[in-house]
Image: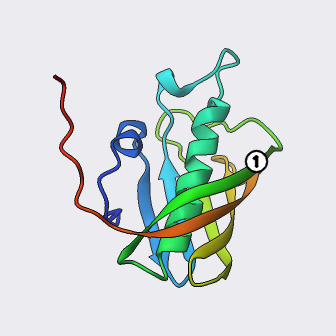
Amino acid sequence: MSIPFGAVIPFVDHLGFTLEKFEGGQSELHYSPALAHLNSFAVTHGGAVMTLLDVVMATAARSVETDMGVVTIEMKTSFMRPAKASGSEKLVAKGHLMHRTRSMAFTEGHVFDADGQLCAHATGTFKYVSRRPAAVLSTD
């Protein structure tokens, strides 16, 4: 059973990420890439993998300060192999808070394919920010 993200994130909802672990500086997300999320080589698009890494690192940072939000300051990603998952298979992303200050979080994230092989690694820096009520989206 998935854990609520604690915030409305339409792009994350669109991609279908689920939060499976959210505690003590650790997070885990699962992702079943849809056909529309693949590149021309029929593997998960790098932008989708980077988004997965961004979100898993952000949730790791937020897991120790749940009443705060975070915004990405910087992120570096390395791709090791194609992120393959088909049918009911999922990619698994794991995030870890390495260090934090009063206002900043330093994190790392890993994405594993359906066979458990490491596909991508990232490091990221996030700034803690106060949560504000979500703005109403308008189509006007």
Q: Rate crowding at label 1 as few (under 14), some (14 to 19) or many (20 or more) other CA atoms within 10 Å.
A: some
* x 49%, y 66%: residue: 59
In this picture, residue 120 sits left or right of residue 23:
right
* x 22%, y 48%: residue: 135
Q: Which residue is mark 1?
A: 77
- List x then y, in percent, for residue 66: 39, 78
Residue type (three-letter) at the residue carrying disc 1:
Thr
- Residue 57 lies, with reference to residue 25, above or below; the image says above
- Residue 1 lies, with reference to residue 17, above or below; the image says below
Q: Quadrant of residue 136?
A: top left
- List x then y, in percent, for residue 64: 49, 82
Q: Quadrant of residue 85?
A: top right
In this rendered view, identify the residue nearer to me: 73 or 117. Answer: 73
Q: Could you tell me which secondary element the residue under label 1 belongs to? A: strand
Number of numbered labels in the structure image: 1
Image coloring type: rainbow
* x 63%, y 47%: residue: 114
